[in-house]
Image (spheres, grey):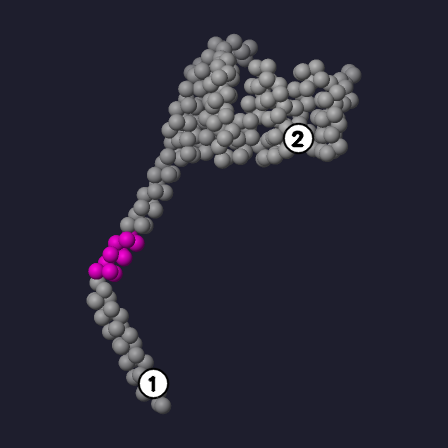
């Protein structure tokens, strides 16, 4: 077969394939049009969803940052002078109350986003500072029950402290043991065990505390928790 013949055959095949494709498109015009519309609609929805999510994420971050600035505002009773125009509060309880409202607003608006979840955790902390223990407990429990394990661990750690403050040491001990058994990035086992040992010290059970410190010293020889435990076991340093 010469070159001219092969070229003609290729040309005929291309023409035939193109003709068949055009015929199929013509016969299935409505189906092709519907599919094209569906694809375009899916792209528009995806882009729109991404823009909405980004907008809500930015708004959540702004609300949470505002609440944190209030929560970290200086107290007017501080010895340090406060610069003009800087917001301040007469007491930690007053500051916590102002921040609490902002954290709750952010949590209610953006509870499905990370900043909204963080805001609910800080709402629980500010409730503690306000002395509203029942609200603090229910708020922190809602965070502790969430799927965000790192934040849930922080909430449980705060709950353990609240239980201790309100005379419920058995509940606090149980919670701290759970945290030590299932550590997370935010609450490593060493942190939970140190808190547990300090609780035993406060409850006048020094032997229980020493047992935990000794365990930590052996398990975490070079880590921060192990070094703190070693210092606790060695007693107060002499000047």
| Position of the N terminus by quadrant | bottom left
Question: How many discs appear?
Answer: 2
| Position of the C terminus by quadrant | top right
Q: In this rendering, is residue 232 above or below 45?
A: above
- Among numbered discs 1 and 2, the one appearing first in the sequence: 1
* Segment colored magenta: 30-40
Q: Position of residue 100 (x, y in %)?
A: 44, 19
Residue 156, by quadrant, is top right
Secondary structure under the numbered disc 2 in the rendered image? helix
Instruction: Tell whether 144 sits left or right of 234.
Output: left
Q: Tell me if I can see residue 42 in this picture.
A: yes
Q: Which residue position is annotated with label 2?
A: 190
Residue 106, by quadrant, is top left
Mark 2 neighbour density, 10 Å: few (under 14) some (14–19) many (20 or more):
many
Which mark's residue is nearer the viewer, 1 or 2?
A: 2
Secondary structure under the numbered disc 1 in the rendered image? helix
Residue for point 45% across, 27% down: 119
Residue for point 46% across, 26% down: 120
Q: In this rendering, is residue 193 above or below 11?
A: above
């Amino acid at each position: 077969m010469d070159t001219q013949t092969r070229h003609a055959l290729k040309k005929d095949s291309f023409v035939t394939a193109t003709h068949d494709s055009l015929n199929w498109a013509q016969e299935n015009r409505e189906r092709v049009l519907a599919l094209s519309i569906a694809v375009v609609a899916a792209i528009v929805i995806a882009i729109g969803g991404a823009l909405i999510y980004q907008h809500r994420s930015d708004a959540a971050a702004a609300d949470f940052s505002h609440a944190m600035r209030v929560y970290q505002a200086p107290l007017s009773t501080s010895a340090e002078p406060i610069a003009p125009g800087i917001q301040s509060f007469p007491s930690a309880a007053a500051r916590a109350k102002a921040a609490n409202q902002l954290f709750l607003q952010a949590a209610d608006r953006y509870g499905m986003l990370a900043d909204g979840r963080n805001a609910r955790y800080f709402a629980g902390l500010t409730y503690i500072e306000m002395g509203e223990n029942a609200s603090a407990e229910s708020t922190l429990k809602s965070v502790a029950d969430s799927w965000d394990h790192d934040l849930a661990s922080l909430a449980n750690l705060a709950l353990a402290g609240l239980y201790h403050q309100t005379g419920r040491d058995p509940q606090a001990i149980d919670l701290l043991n759970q945290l030590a058994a299932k550590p997370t990035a935010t609450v490593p086992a060493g942190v939970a065990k140190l808190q547990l040992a300090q609780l035993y010290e406060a409850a006048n059970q020094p032997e229980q505390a020493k047992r935990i410190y000794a365990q930590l010293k052996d398990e975490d020889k070079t880590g921060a928790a192990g070094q703190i435990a070693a210092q606790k076991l060695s007693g107060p340093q002499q000047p």
